Image (cartoon, coloured by chain):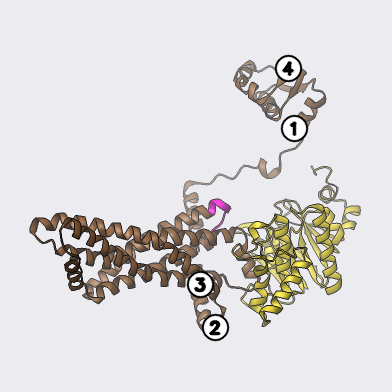
Chain colours: A brown, B yellow
Amino acid sequence: MRFVGELHFGSCFSAWDEVRRLLQPSAPHLDFDLSQVAGLDGGATALLLELRAEAIAAGSKTEIVGATGRVRSLLELYGAHPQRPSLQAPPAQIGILDQIGRETLSLVNESNTLDFIGDAVIATTQAIRSPSRVNWRDLPRLMERAGADGIPIVLMINFLVGLVTGFQAALQLKQFGANIFVADLVGLSVTRELAPLMTAIIIAGRSGAAFSAELGTMRVSEEIDALRTLGLDPYQFLVFPRVLALTFVAPLLTILADVIGIAGGLLVAMFSLDLTFHSYIVETEKALDLWDVFSGILKSGVFGFTVALIACQRGLATSGGAEGVGRSTTSAVVTSLFAIVVIDAIFTVIFHVFGG
Amino acid sequence: MIEVEELTIGYGERVVLERLDFTIQAGQVFAILGGSGCGKSTLLRHLIGLETPMGGTIHVAGAPPVQDTGPPKYGVLFQSGALFGSMTLAQNVALPLRTWSSLDAAAIDTIVRAKLRLVGLEGFENHMPSELSGGMKKRAGIARALALDPPLLFLDEPSAGLDPVSSVELDQLLLTLNHSLGMTTVIVTHELQSIFAVADACIMLDRGARGIIARGHPATLRDQSDDPRVRAFFNRLARPT
């Protein structure tokens, strides 16, 4: 088989199936004559060598002949390296049950949840014994990032939630002439449920994702290892300030969310139900007691604590470069959202049982 | 200074290197050599206590190298430099001093500037790591590793990514530290020029053999070894068949 002219990947690839067909049926001896080839590129060389391998596999004694100059040196370059032993040996086949077992074990090992909890407890004990070991220096910066920087989005979302709740309540209560009770409904649902929940979701999406990505990047770029070789505990240096920051900031954001959520309901009441500012506020005061507000704030503290712990755990368990960072960040947010809903349900049951 | 006996290391169930035996004398510049993927960096991570061996023992200055909170007994340079991205260069170098010394801020500042000058980064004190080239990050990493003047220094691929001039300067720095302070240095590398310039002794690892295939002075191995894998590594002319 004689090849003529310039062989370039782009042009010869389209004709390659045709060339393959020409090899059928396989001849006992086949030479690829490249004596009239003026030049070829790397892609074309790879295709040519693959073609030769296919012909040999089909039983032909096949050689490439007539190559000179640059064509020859390129062929030698691509064909000179013997396959590495590690690449020649295919991975051993394993059964489906074995595969499921291995995947399950690797999932359990990868997340290192129990290790994390154990290490966190030890770090907490050490931090209580000697508080100077904790990296307090980062705390204000972390609180600013998680708290002050998050205020606009927390206000906007909670205002809209209060507004929507107010609208829905107004539609129903108007039918019974019970417009004033919009204030009760909005006040109770915002302070007890909606404000802590929405704020926690925003915190999980903003700060939880940021913490996980930050620690994950530090993990894959060996910064966590560097910290350990400097005699610093990653839990006291990185995890502690983050957990403290979110545990303090979440209740503060929730207080703002309570106020702005009620303001959303007020807006609906004033413009849609013709209630006055004064009557709405008085009714809200009557409907709410201190426990309603405090229970929401208490919950939000637990939400913040949980989100920070999950985010730090996922971040520190990151492996596998940039893709691993993405995976742990996604996992941190999803797990946090799940945990928030579960904890909220537990709180609701506890408050109900104890009459709160 | 470092004694390794019957050491077997790996990840999970996968054994990377097995039954390693070697000793690193105090004051030596010791190189761990081998091709990519042979387990050099994994061995280093075990020597500095970041990983637990599957079998055998490691003793660094008479004790197993357990990473614990407390003043570090040795300095480590990681492959990427591993500088803390949220801190300036000066803060990176100052961190171990701030944590483990009772020096005041002015004294720490003086030491930090001296360490950065030592690695040719004077004037970069307030730069963030993201503003530096790969080689500069590595040099800053060395400055941080040297912050507490450790008696033992571990370096993972210190010359990789450095230009030839910086690489020679780094070799000179290591030699000076070794000669003037008697600092024991363990280098993981496959840079031939650095090996011959600084190493007193070396071991060569091989992925296929999952262990040490040669040990001794680098020049002696290069000139006298009959092992085709060792000759191929030093000559870089052909691969062993």
Give the percent coordinates (x, y) of residue A47.
67, 27
Q: Which chain does the numbered disc 2 sit on?
A: A
For the residues bearing labels 3 and 1, Cβ distance under 8 angstroms: no
- Identify which amino acid the numbered label 3 is placed on: Leu
Residue where numbered disc 2 is placed: A130
Q: What's drawn in magenta, residue-wise?
A: A318-324
Give the percent coordinates (x, y) of residue B8.
68, 63
Label 2 SS = loop
- Mark 4 or 3: in front is 3
Residue where numbered disc 4 is placed: A5
For the residues bearing labels 2 and 1, Cβ distance under 8 angstroms: no
Label 1 SS = helix
What label does residue A79 carry, if any?
1
- The residues bearing labels 4 and 2 have C-alpha atoms spaced at a distance of 79 Å
- The residues bearing labels 1 and 4 have C-alpha atoms spaced at a distance of 21 Å
Mark closer to the chain start, 4 or 2? 4
Left or right of B72 in this view: B179: right
